[in-house]
Amino acid sequence: MKILEGKVAIVTGASRGIGRMIALKFAQQGAIVAFSDLKIDENAQAVEKELRSYGVQAKAYASNASDYNASQEFVDQVVNDFGKVDILINNAGITRDGLLMRMTEEQWDLVIAVNLKSVFNLTKAVQKYMLKQRSGSIVNMSSVVGVRGNAGQSNYSASKAGIIGFTKSIALELGSRNIRCNAIAPGFIETEMTAQLPEAEKEGWLKSIPLKRGGKPEEVADVAAFLASDMSSYVSGQVINVCGAMLT
């Protein structure tokens, strides 16, 4: 049996990397997938086609997750198109790395807006529908650097730490309505983003991982599918590290 059969899932930032793999995993498990990105380019269209190849409905939407009104309109359109929303995956994220002494206000504000404010925007937008149906699962993508910090990533670390505090608060607020909220904290996952890192930096990361390898996007997607499904019906307010024991 497919664990997400008949559920409607929203995934932000699903055109590539971890978000794309989560969307594909959800489609494989029977979910209707609505995903967003800033613009619907050839890449997003290819993902939409790939999702539909699993025999489910899927639609790409152009939407800026860091914009409050755009997020409201996006969720309203998804519910108009598919009738409901059962799952929200807040995955949209960017980096603008640099030491604090060189970091600009623009770099700080942009990362906080895209990574953290987007989680508020989308959660606020789906909340009214989930409250009405008295069910829902919200999964927020944090990071191991949101748990332990990382030099040169104070903006990114702050945004991902903020997601953890938000996740725990929303789990407490919405639990009585059977709405769950959890976070995933990926470690070093092999994506387009990490592929751009210098080899010396990659080797440094790998040395710190007891499993001695980077994670695969599929391994994060498996945890997301578990948290989105009824298999995790008594799991809420938690942060699950997917990091090869980098954090214990």
Image: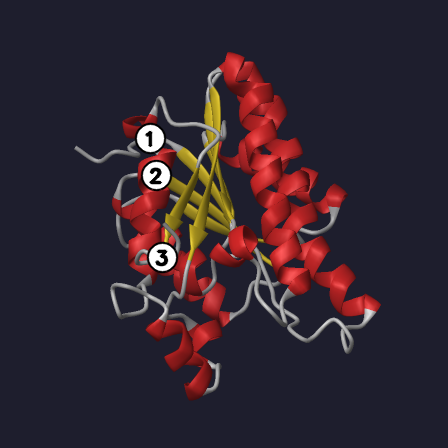
Nearer-the-camera pick, 83 or 235: 235
Q: In the image, which disc is placed on residue 242?
A: none
Mark 1 closeness class: few <14, some 14–19, many ≥20 residues within 10 Å: few
**Label 1–label 2 contact, CB within 8 A:** yes
Residue 19: where, in percent of width, then height?
Answer: 44, 56
Is the residue 3 above or below the residue 177 in the image? below
Residue under the point 81% across and 72% down: 104
Q: In which quarter of the image is the N terminus?
A: top left
> Disc 1 or 3, which lies upstream in sequence?
1
- Amino acid type at image mark 3: Cys
Mark 2 closeness class: few <14, some 14–19, many ≥20 residues within 10 Å: many
Residue under the point 48% across and 81% down: 197
Q: Name the residue under label 2.
A: 31
* Residue at disc 1, secondary structure: loop
Mark 3 or 2: the one toward you: 3
Q: Name the residue under label 1.
A: 6
**Label 3–label 2 contact, CB within 8 A:** no
Farthest residue, direction top: 176
- Amino acid type at image mark 2: Ala
Q: Name the residue under label 3.
A: 243
Is the residue 180 above or below the residue 105 in the image? above
Whether residue 38 appears in this view of the structure is no
